[in-house]
DNA sequence: CCTGATTTATTTAATATTGTATATTTTAAC
DNA sequence: GTTAAAATATACAATATTAAATAAATCAGG
């Protein structure tokens, strides 16, 4: 659903073809989303089928694959607003793959688990440091909108939570709570 | 990948058919995973094709749909350990759909956004309360393993982070940071 | 005892995502 | 100048998830 919203949101402003959409996503939203080519072309096809977008023109440069330039329709604009409101009102439940690994912990030797957990803590510390560094860089650039900072913060808060949880887990494990 | 690991992990202990697997997942891991029927049957088919599991027998009770009982193979046991180690060593990057909504905030009136954010904060507060209540219930039952508590904590830490972030966002928005 | 809800069990279609293949053009480096 | 890498652009197969359809058995309540 997110892919659809992003595509419609970008097409609101200008005509675009698939590759351009991917490019804009990477440039402007690359830090906090990841949408593959396949997803974009699939969504474009679907949205087109449903009448939310239309092919405005088919361009060709030299011998490169021809590209379809898409255009949003009126019902597409409505659909965008619907998706946006839906998203603002939905609280998503996140699941963590690592919980499953933790559940099957008993199948690994304890010292192996310990090594993995400590490495995980180290990596999370690095990521958090990297985030904080990236952010202070941003803050020194006044052209970066405050909104980007808020989105960035989201990841920061969760990374910090993850780090705290892992540290907690290590402490409890060392105190022999799970043996 | 998680689905495969769960299935192999459960089949390590006993012979099971699809429905039973779904049942066990819901009963033992329902609080922190969500795997649909389709995913299970698809994964069983794939694992079977790859030789990680085999159909041990096909049972039938009355006129109900006959059920294939699966059995893990030696290579399946190896695959389980491989997946488990892989999972323990991978740090997953989480993306949040809500970030996309935030990005397109400018398309909604400010007071609408405010209402949504406050509702979001209220819901998160409720969820957190519910989690804390559930946990104190668990702690009073000595038969619940300490591990379950650790997994539960994971969700708690992240829910708390989410709540803090949203509260933060509301404060900043009220102070006019994004207008 | 019969009616409706729940449980048992799988299949299928629709939807969605990832990864890879393809093929050209432009750019950079040596 | 030529060769390797990066950028341009899409298509398709493989993988994965969700939702709905099917259909019988069981159980609870009146």
Image (cartoon, coloured by chain):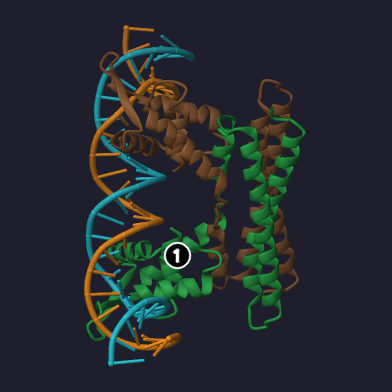
Chain colours: A green, B brown, C orange, D cyan
Q: Quadrant of the C terminus of chain B?
A: bottom right
Write down the residue under mark 1.
A5
The answer to whether residue B166 of the structure is visible from this angle is no
> What is the quadrant of residue B148 in the picture?
top right
In front of the other: A135 or B112: A135
Q: Quadrant of the N terminus of chain B?
A: top left
Residue at 48% of width from left, 71% of height from top?
A: A26
> What is the quadrant of residue B74 in the picture?
top left
The answer to whether residue B41 of the structure is visible from this angle is yes
Image x and y of residue A157, in percent: 68, 57
- SS for tag 1? helix
Residue at 51% of width from left, 39% of height from top?
A: B84
- Vertical arrangement, residue A16 with respect to residue B155, above or below: below
User: With A131 as the anchor, is A60 left or right in this view?
Assistant: left
In front of the other: B12 or B45: B12
- Vertical arrangement, residue B16 with respect to residue A40, above or below: above
Density class for disc 1 (Cα within 10 Å; few <14, some 14-19, many ≥20) is many
Label 1 lies in what chain? Answer: A
Report the number of numbered marks. Answer: 1
In front of the other: A44 or D7: D7
User: With B175 as the anchor, is B22 left or right in this view?
Assistant: left
- Vertical arrangement, residue D24 with respect to residue A15, above or below: above
Image x and y of residue A113, in percent: 62, 38
Image x and y of residue B177, in percent: 71, 74
Image x and y of residue A75, in percent: 36, 68
Residue at 39% of width from left, 32% of height from top?
A: B76
Residue at 27% of width from left, 21% of height from top?
A: B66
């Amino acid at each position: 659903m997110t892919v659809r919203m992003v595509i419609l949101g970008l097409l609101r402003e200008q005509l675009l073809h698939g590759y351009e959409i991917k490019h804009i996503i990477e440039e402007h939203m690359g830090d906090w989303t990841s949408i593959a080519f396949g997803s974009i072309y699939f969504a474009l096809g679907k949205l087109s089928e449903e009448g939310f977008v239309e092919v405005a023109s088919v361009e060709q440069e030299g011998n490169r694959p021809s590209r379809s330039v898409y255009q949003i329709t009126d019902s597409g604009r409505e659909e965008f607003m619907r998706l946006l409101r839906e998203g603002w009102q939905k609280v998503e439940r996140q699941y963590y793959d690592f919980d499953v690994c933790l559940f099957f912990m008993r199948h690994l030797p304890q010292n192996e688990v310990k090594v993995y957990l400590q490495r995980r803590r180290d990596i999370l510390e690095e990521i958090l440091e990297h985030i904080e560094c990236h952010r202070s860089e941003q803050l020194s650039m006044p052209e970066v909108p405050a909104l980007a900072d808020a989105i960035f913060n989201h990841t920061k808060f969760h990374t910090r939570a993850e780090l705290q949880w892992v540290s907690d887990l290590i402490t409890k494990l060392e105190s022999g709570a799970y043996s």
